[in-house]
């Protein structure tokens, strides 16, 4: 570990990058809604920049695992992602909408860099007994970003326009470049890199995710939870317009969830061993299901309460997911497992948004009900995979 690289620098860079990322989705969706005038177009733009993560995440993770200085590769990915946001914004005003969607899909290949790619580097910054607390603090950066990002997107969109909100989001991502570039490297290539190909590493990472029960069920539950979250996010412009008095105000509901998520994750950071992370994951899905069921009525007070409740489930669930990944992932495959997990979640979010966008324009209550059912299925999916396992693919599967 590079002792000159502090956890504070890591967290500062993570907050900037993730705030820009959390801001970019609502900002792009509001920009698409303003220019195209439909929820379907707005949700299609959001889905476009997220759906391709399933392809980009595993490849990015494999290259991060093979890099002697993974931080520099991460910084290039952030720079290209920020550039892509700028090109999308320019394309909304000058290019046919299908072309802009293609650009969004290409940009989305690098999306996992802002989540899993960054978190995979944490054990080089905080080692040993410092890791559980650092892991909870890292999860808090997502909650902080979820609080600040949508609030900035909605506030800037109302005050200065949705296009300006996109510019602010890509600027925040660019501000994280120095922290990413200087992340600690490794003394030499990761174990097995010289003897194996990228395809071999991809296969090995997949075997670990599928072969270790704790990791597999945590991944499955979190992915299905993200489908529900995408469904709700696609409803935000219409919720803002019909219930809160303006499309831009819908994005502010995400900040309600982020407030409670931040508070809940802060409590977890103080007592990181108070509950088993595996139990927190499925319990978090149940809480989210109850939250989206509460939102179905569409009353302003109920909506705020629903998003506050959802954050209580989302924040600790994310911290617990990171704890399981750090615990289960072999060191030489950690980057790939984190980015693959992130890419699956991002893609699941995109599918949820794409599904709910057209449905929301017909019935908001049906979309929110579907989100509640999906989150309940996420909790039930946890029990589908048994807690113990056998040796798979030459790797010992931990119970």
Image (tube, rainbow, N blue to C red):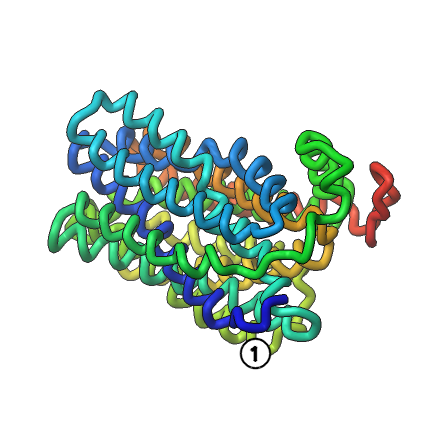
In the depicted view, which residue is nearer to us: 40 or 180? 180
Q: How many marks?
A: 1
Residue 255 as seen in the image, left or right of residue 327: left
- Residue 2 % position (x, y): 59, 67
Give the residue at x 35% y 62%. Answer: 147
Q: Where does the N terminus fall, quadrant-wise?
A: bottom right
From the viewer's perspective, is 68 left or right of 46?
Answer: right
**Residue 249 sits above or below residue 45 on the image:** below
- Taking the image as shown, residue 380 lies to the left or right of residue 225, namely right
- Looking at the picture, does residue 113 appear above or below residue 45? below
Residue density around tag 1, few if under 14, some if 14–19, many if 20 or more, within 10 Å: few
Q: Residue 333, position in %: x, y?
A: 69, 46
At horizontal 38% and vertical 38% (from top left) the residue drawn is 367
Residue extending furthest toward the bottom: 270
Left/right placement of residue 273 relative to residue 396 reads left
Q: Report which quarter residue 337 is drawn in.
A: top right
Instruction: Name the secondary structure under disc 1.
Output: helix
The quadrant in which the C terminus is found is bottom right
Image x and y of residue 32, in percent: 23, 35
For the residue pair 86 and 299, the one nearer the viewer reads as 86
Where in the figure is residue 290, as x and y percent of width and height?
A: 48, 55
x 29%, y 29%: residue: 40
Q: Is residue 180 visible?
A: yes
Farthest front residue in view:
188
What residue do we see at 62% from left, 54% from top?
Answer: 282
Mark 1 highlights which residue? 270
Q: Quadrant of residue 254?
A: bottom left
Let me know if residue 210 appears in the view. no
């Amino acid at each position: 570990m590079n002792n000159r690289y502090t956890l504070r620098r890591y967290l500062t860079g993570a907050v900037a990058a993730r705030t820009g990322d959390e801001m970019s989705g609502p900002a792009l969706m509001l920009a698409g809604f303003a220019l195209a005038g439909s929820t379907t177009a707005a949700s299609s733009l959001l889905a476009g920049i997220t759906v391709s993560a399933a392809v980009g995440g595993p490849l990015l993770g494999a290259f991060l695992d093979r890099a002697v200085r993974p931080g520099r590769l991460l910084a290039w990915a952030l720079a290209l992602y920020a550039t892509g946001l700028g090109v999308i914004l320019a394309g909304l005003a000058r290019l046919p909408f299908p072309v802009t969607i293609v650009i969004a899909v290409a940009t989305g290949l690098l999306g996992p860099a802002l989540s899993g790619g960054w978190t995979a580097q944490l054990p080089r910054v905080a080692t040993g007994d410092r890791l559980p607390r650092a892991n909870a603090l890292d999860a808090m950066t997502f909650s902080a970003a979820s609080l600040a990002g949508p609030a900035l997107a909605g506030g800037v969109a109302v005050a200065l326009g949705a296009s300006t909100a996109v510019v602010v989001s890509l600027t925040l991502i660019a501000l994280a470049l120095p922290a990413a570039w200087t992340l600690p490297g490794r003394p030499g290539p990761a174990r097995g890199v010289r003897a194996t190909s990228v395809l071999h590493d991809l296969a090995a990472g997949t075997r670990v995710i599928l072969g270790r029960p704790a990791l597999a069920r945590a991944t499955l539950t979190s992915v299905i939870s993200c489908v529900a979250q995408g469904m709700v996010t696609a409803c935000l412009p219409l919720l803002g317009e019909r219930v809160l008095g303006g499309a831009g105000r819908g994005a502010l509901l995400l900040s309600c969830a982020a407030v409670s998520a931040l508070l809940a994750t802060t409590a977890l950071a103080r007592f990181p061993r108070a509950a088993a992370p595996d139990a927190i994951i499925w319990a978090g899905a149940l809480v989210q299901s109850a939250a989206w069921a509460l939102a179905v009525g569409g009353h302003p007070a109920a909506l705020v309460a629903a998003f506050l409740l959802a954050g209580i489930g989302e924040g600790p669930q994310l911290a617990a997911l990171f704890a399981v990944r750090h615990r289960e992932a072999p060191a030489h495959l950690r980057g790939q497992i984190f980015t693959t997990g992130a890419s699956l979640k991002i893609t699941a979010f995109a599918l949820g948004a794409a599904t709910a966008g057209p449905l929301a324009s017909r019935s908001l209550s049906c979309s929110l009900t579907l989100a509640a059912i999906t989150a309940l299925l996420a909790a039930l999916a946890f029990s589908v995979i048994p807690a113990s396992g056998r040796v798979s693919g030459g790797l010992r599967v931990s119970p």
